[in-house]
Amino acid sequence: MINTEVSVAMKHIDPSLNVTTTAPPDGQLGLALDVEGELAGENAHILRHAVEPVFITPTAPHLTLNMHGVKYMDSTGIGVLVSIIQKISDRDGRLVIVGLNDTGQQLLRILQLAGLDCVSVQAA
């Protein structure tokens, strides 16, 4: 039997962005990350690197992002999120995003309307 859980303890810290691995929500598999700070410009790659372990599993990737602590996101940060969403969609995975502010929720609803239905958005 193949273990479908990703168990990686890591913390990516930048002066303006902090990404920390946490336990997935009850009953969920995969990787869960808390994202805090500004997802923008030169630090957006931190999130891209932090999600890489979810793509090394032989099964469909499952990722939970807690974005409650994100104070600002520019087009680079949005691009990283779209890239993650596309990778997960290509592998029939699932992405749950928790804690987005109203603007972020509207953006992800637009992405869902565009056919990226592997994403679900939950209230904080």
Image (cartoon, rainbow, N blue to C red):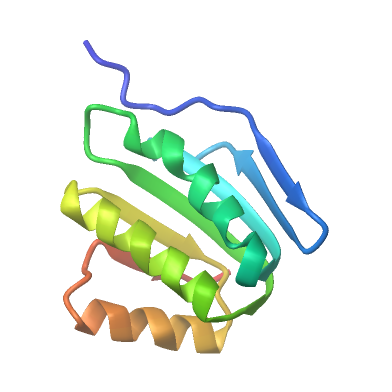
* Residue depicted at x 62% and y 28%: 9
Return the x and y of residue 60 as percentages of the image width and height: 22, 39
Return the x and y of residue 108 as percentages of the image width and height: 38, 78
Residue 27 visible in the picture:
no
* In this picture, residue 55 sits left or right of residue 68: left
Up the image or down, 47 lies above or below 7; here it is below
Q: Nearer the viewer, residue 53 or 28?
A: 53
Quarter holding residue 111: bottom left
Q: Nearer the viewer, residue 106 or 24?
A: 106
* In this picture, residue 4 sits left or right of residue 1: right
Up the image or down, 30 lies above or below 65; here it is above
Return the x and y of residue 75 as percentages of the image width and height: 51, 81
Return the x and y of residue 38 as percentages of the image width and height: 70, 70
What is the quadrant of the C terminus in the image?
Answer: bottom right
Question: In the displayed image of the protein, which residue is found farthest to the right?
Answer: 15
Q: How many marks?
A: 0
Residue 102 visible in the picture:
yes
* Residue depicted at x 44% and y 34%: 53
Up the image or down, 30 lies above or below 86; here it is above
* Residue depicted at x 54% and y 44%: 50
* In this picture, residue 53 sits left or right of residue 88: right
Question: In the displayed image of the protein, which residue is found farthest to the front?
Answer: 42
* Residue depicted at x 21% and y 10%: 1
